[in-house]
Amino acid sequence: MLSELIDFYLRVAVNDLPDDICWIVVQPLSGVLSVNQAVTRIGGRPENLLNMTTMEAYSLSPGDTLSFEESETAVSILQIGGFAGMFPEMIEPLSRGARAWVAYWDVNAGFSMLHWVDGSCVGGWDPYSPREGWVTGLGPLARYADFFLRYDIDDEDRDPNHREAVTLAVIEAESGVRLDRAWIDREHPAMLVTQGLDGGLEFPPFDD
């Protein structure tokens, strides 16, 4: 199952995904979570949401837009050209009473995966950290360790998209939420996110 998902995401990474994204999936431990509830949790205002495709949102303010989608089991959030999910003040409130996964990479080879549960970071993966610490560092995701360990940053013949593919495959296996071209092309509620002068996140309205 996971091997098939990895193969799928290897194709997606090559053909469909931008070079720098932050992908967040939030799955409540009980009940349901709506986009409006997720926006409110992070300090945004649902009335500032505007419907548009992910690329339309990106074109309005490159790197500073979040696109949201809710399903029966989770809320997913995509940011192109930014890293809002790496801010604890965003992911901590999102993960209260929930499980949350964050995958982030950029054009400068930055990469990180985080797993939060009920307001605390419980694991993650940094492919630049020593390999001997990967299994422990994955926390509850350690059962997927063999798939992560197939990535060797020092192997010049490695598939350059394996780390993105295994990360997205694990998130889908855990949450049931898929990131693909169809997700990117659909219209979603979108909002602005900027870094304030105090270093925190702010969510201003789009300009009229």
Image (cartoon, rainbow, N blue to C red):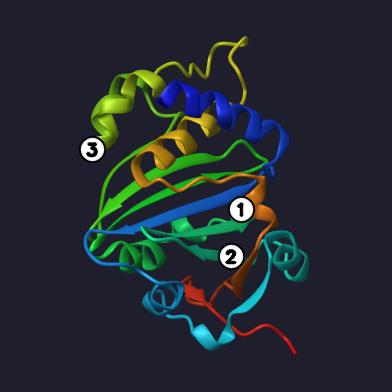
Can you name the residue that lies furthest to the front here?
Answer: 72
Secondary structure, mark 2, is strand
**Residue type highlighted by circle 2:** Ser
Residue at screen point 37% across, 47% down? 175
Secondary structure, mark 3, is helix
The mark found on residue 140 in the picture is: 3
Q: Position of residue 179 (x, y in %)?
A: 55, 46
Foreground residue among 107 and 44 = 44
> Mark 2 or mark 3: which comes first in sequence?
2
Q: Is residue 130 left or right of residue 199?
A: left
What separation in Å lies between label 3 and label 1 (alpha carbons)? 27 Å
* Residue placed under numbered mark 2 in the picture: 67
* Residue placed under numbered mark 1 in the picture: 183
Q: Is residue 71 left or right of residue 135?
A: right
**Residue type highlighted by circle 1:** Trp
The mark found on residue 195 in the picture is: none
Q: Is residue 40 left or right of residue 93?
A: right
| Closer to the eye: label 2 or 1 | 1
How crowded pointer 2 is (Cα within 10 Å; few <14, some 14-19, many 20+) is rated as many
Residue at screen point 62% across, 44% down? 106
Q: Position of residue 156 (x, y in %)?
A: 62, 11
The C terminus lies in quadrant? bottom right
Q: Is residue 84 above or below residue 201?
A: above
Secondary structure, mark 1, is helix
Q: Position of residue 185 (x, y in %)?
A: 70, 55
